[in-house]
């Protein structure tokens, strides 16, 4: 059996079992039986169940990081770069919706070293994302009245909650959804949005005065 086949089979079985009955309630034996492999084969690629849970999320995180790097490397204007990154994050999150659901539900059960590794890699991704927003702020594209960290958290909070409400079999496919959420985010951080809010606030104050 090829390496990719074993890893894919084990990962798929683990995701389905973790999603249906919970990480804590799933044994390694159940995973190998569902995957149709031996424990020896599983432990050849995953040192523990903890390693398996980390691997489920690591595949998504690695993919998104590779795609982020490729998008930034194209050297397109800031607005186009940020839009492309946002759309990609949402589309890949939908593609790995079940994996993301399992991970965010069970991440607190990871060992301390694994949690630290996830935090480090997610921070690196978010820092690159924040850097694009900061560049746009310097160019006058995006609002500066709200900290960049808040703007970034605003976007990723929508992404992390996708599994709570989005259904792939629903009326809107991932591409439509990705552009809708991206449009909402970009409009909310546009410099013009801050100006409009300031103007509205000024008008209200004048009327009340």
Image (cartoon, rainbow, N blue to C red):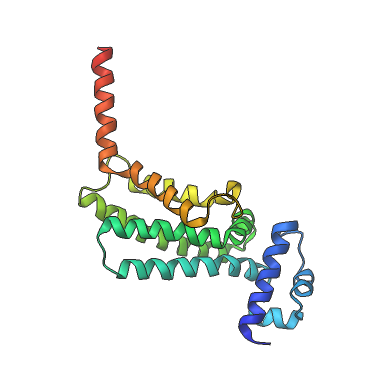
Which residue is nearer to you in this view: 187 or 56? Answer: 187
Image quarter of the N terminus: bottom right
On the image, which quarter does residue 20 sit in? Answer: bottom right
Residue 22 visible in image: no
Q: Position of residue 95 (x, y in %)?
A: 55, 62
Farthest residue to the bottom: give it: 1
Which residue is nearer to you in this view: 155 or 76? Answer: 76
Please indicate whether residue 58 sits to the left or right of residue 200 in the image.
right
Image quarter of the C terminus: top left
Q: Position of residue 151 (x, y in %)?
A: 37, 46
State the residue at coordinates (26%, 18%). Answer: 205
Which residue is nearer to you in this view: 82 or 120? Answer: 82
Farthest residue to the left: give it: 139
State the residue at coordinates (20%, 52%). Answer: 139
State the residue at coordinates (74%, 74%). Answer: 35
Please indicate whether residue 158 sits to the left or right of residue 28 in the image.
left
Residue 55 visible in image: yes
Please indicate whether residue 6 sits to the left or right of residue 76 in the image.
right
Farthest residue to the top: give it: 209
Give the number of callouts: 0
Q: Position of residue 129 (x, y in %)?
A: 36, 58
């Amino acid at each position: 059996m090829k390496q990719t086949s074993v890893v894919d089979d084990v990962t798929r079985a683990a995701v389905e079992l973790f999603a249906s009955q919970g990480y804590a309630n799933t044994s390694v034996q159940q995973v190998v039986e569902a995957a149709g492999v031996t424990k020896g084969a599983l432990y050849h690629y995953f040192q523990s169940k903890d390693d398996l849970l980390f691997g489920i999320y690591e595949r998504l995180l690695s993919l998104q990081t590779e795609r982020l790097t490729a998008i930034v490397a194209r050297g397109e204007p800031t607005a186009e770069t940020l839009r492309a990154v946002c759309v990609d994050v949402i589309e890949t999150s939908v593609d790995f919706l079940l994996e993301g659901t399992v991970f965010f539900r069970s991440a607190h059960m990871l060992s301390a070293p694994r949690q630290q590794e996830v935090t480090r890699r997610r921070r690196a991704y978010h820092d690159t994302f924040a850097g694009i927003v900061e560049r746009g702020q310097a160019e006058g594209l995006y609002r500066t009245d709200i900290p960049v960290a808040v703007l970034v958290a605003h976007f990723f909070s929508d992404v992390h909650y996708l599994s709570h409400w989005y259904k792939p079999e629903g009326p809107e496919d991932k591409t439509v959804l990705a552009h809708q959420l991206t449009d909402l985010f970009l409009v909310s951080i546009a410099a013009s949005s801050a100006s409009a809010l300031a103007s509205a606030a000024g008008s209200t104050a004048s009327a009340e005065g």
